[in-house]
Amino acid sequence: GMGGVGKTTLAKRIYGSIGNQFQHHAWVFVPSRYKMKDLLLAILSELIPIEEETSKLDDVKLGEKLRNFLQGKRYLIVMDGVEETQLWETLEKNKVFPNEKHGSRLLLTTRSKNVASLASSSSSRIHNIQPLDDEAKWELLEKLVFKDEKCPQGLVKLGKQIATKCAGLPLALK
């Protein structure tokens, strides 16, 4: 989905509500200029203490270490902000995440339809988040501004105009 539509917020809610149902779980943000080594180290460091010798390993060895750790375990890994198909292709090629039918899950957030399609061909699903409709964006803005109170009647029209200018993007409303 497009930027600001709520992909990360939804992923955080999912992670927060079901993460503890998995033997191991990790959340990593993928910067636009990521290095595979840094990404693998970030995932590993969410799962196990990282020793100095581990941080000196190359991408391939780190991928093997991660795969070996996850082997036979039920895990949830969230990668937030995956924008390049190359990242997914590399992870798949190196079989970093074992798929042994233990109920493990990978959750990716992305703006890229190509990334979503590529990842979904690996037996997962795409959930495309749409911008809020007029009623929902007004309700969100009213809740953000007035908390548990109702908006004063004299400000409703202006508030709805502001909500409309935010194009249904929750991040813009904040």
Image (cartoon, grey):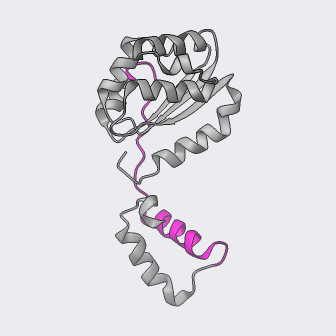
Quarter of the image that includes the N terminus: top left
Q: Nearer the viewer, residue 26 or 61?
A: 61
* Location of residue 47 in the rendering, given as x and y in whole percent from the top left corner: 62, 25
Residue 88 is at least partly visible in this image = yes
Q: Residue furthest front?
A: 52
Which one is in front, 90 or 58?
58
In this picture, is 145 found above or below 55?
Answer: below
Q: Residue 148, image x and y in percent?
A: 67, 73
- Viewer-closest of 62 and 74: 62
- Can residue 99 be seen in this snapshot? no
Q: Is residue 89 magenta?
A: no
- Which percent across, then down, holds residue 26? 58, 30
Q: Is residue 52 left or right of residue 170?
A: right
Q: Position of residue 44 (x, y in %)?
A: 55, 24
Q: Residue at 36% of width from left, 31% of height from top?
A: 116
Residue 143, above or below 94: below
What's drawn in magenta, residue-wise?
120-149
Q: Where on the picture, by quarter, is residue 147?
A: bottom right
Residue found 53% across the figure and 12% down from its top: 65
Task: Judge from the rendering whether residue 84 lies leftward or rightward of residue 49; answer left or right.
Answer: left
